[in-house]
Image: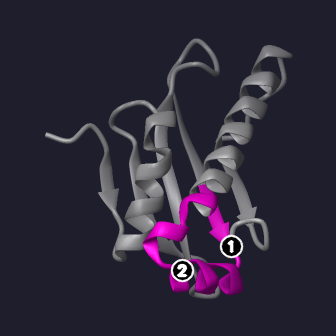
Amino acid sequence: MEAYLYECASPDFEELARVIADLFPEQTRFAELPADDGTPQLTVHWVAMRFGAAARRMTITIAIAPAALARYRALPARLRSRSFAVLRAYVEATLGSLEEQHAKGESVPREVEIALDEEFA
């Protein structure tokens, strides 16, 4: 049985989910869901144990600008590593920011969005 749940309609979104999966605990769910305008987004649902005494359901939505997503999809697989690195860096920075907020005693939002554009692809 796989430690993570991938519910992505397109293989490229599952590939992106797998790039960041190890940053999250087991049982994390990665889903490709449409934004209000229909643009696909990668949504990460997990239970965080590190933001307080009780477990918290958390969501990170990764919104990739349509033009950047089109450029990424046009890239041959061997040239996607830069996009993977950018995605991973943004997710790591977001998680680090949430941890800093918690450490300072500030409330940690349960839902966060990461918007990627030119830097992604």
Q: How is the image coloured?
A: one colour
Q: Residue at x 68, y 73 (%)?
A: 121
Seen as rendered, the residue at the extreme front is: 78
Q: Residue at x 39, y 41 (%)?
A: 28
Q: Tell me which amino acid carries mark 2.
A: Leu
Q: Residue at x 62, y 62 (%)?
A: 83
**Quadrant in the picture for the N terminus:** top left
Residues at discs 2 and 1 in contact (Cβ within 8 Å): yes
Q: Position of residue 63 (x, y in %)?
A: 65, 68
Q: Tell me which amino acid carries mark 1.
A: Ala
Q: Position of residue 36 (x, y in %)?
A: 63, 82
Judge left or right: residue 58 versus residue 111: left
Above or below: residue 102 compared with residue 87: above
Seen as rendered, the residue at the extreme left is: 1
Q: Position of residue 5 (x, y in %)?
A: 30, 50
Residue marked by disc 1: 121
Kindly report the secondary structure that dominates the magenta region of the rendered protein.
helix
Tell me which segment is drawn in magenta.
61-82
Which quadrant would residue 17 be assigned to in this image?
bottom left
Judge left or right: residue 6 versus residue 111: left
Q: Position of residue 65 (x, y in %)?
A: 71, 78
Which of the numbered marks, if any, corresponds to residue 75? Answer: 2
In front: 32, or 88? 88
Above or below: residue 89 compared with residue 105: below
Q: Is residue 80 highlighted in magenta?
A: yes
Q: What distance separates the C-alpha of mark 2 from that of mark 1?
A: 9 Å
Seen as rendered, the residue at the extreme top is: 53
Ranked by sequence position, the earlier of labels 2 and 1 is 2
Which of the numbered marks, if any, corresponds to residue 107? Answer: none
Secondary structure category for the residue under label 2: loop
Q: Is residue 43 highlighted in magenta?
A: no
Circle 2: is it few (<14), some (14-19), or many (20+) Cα within 10 Å? few
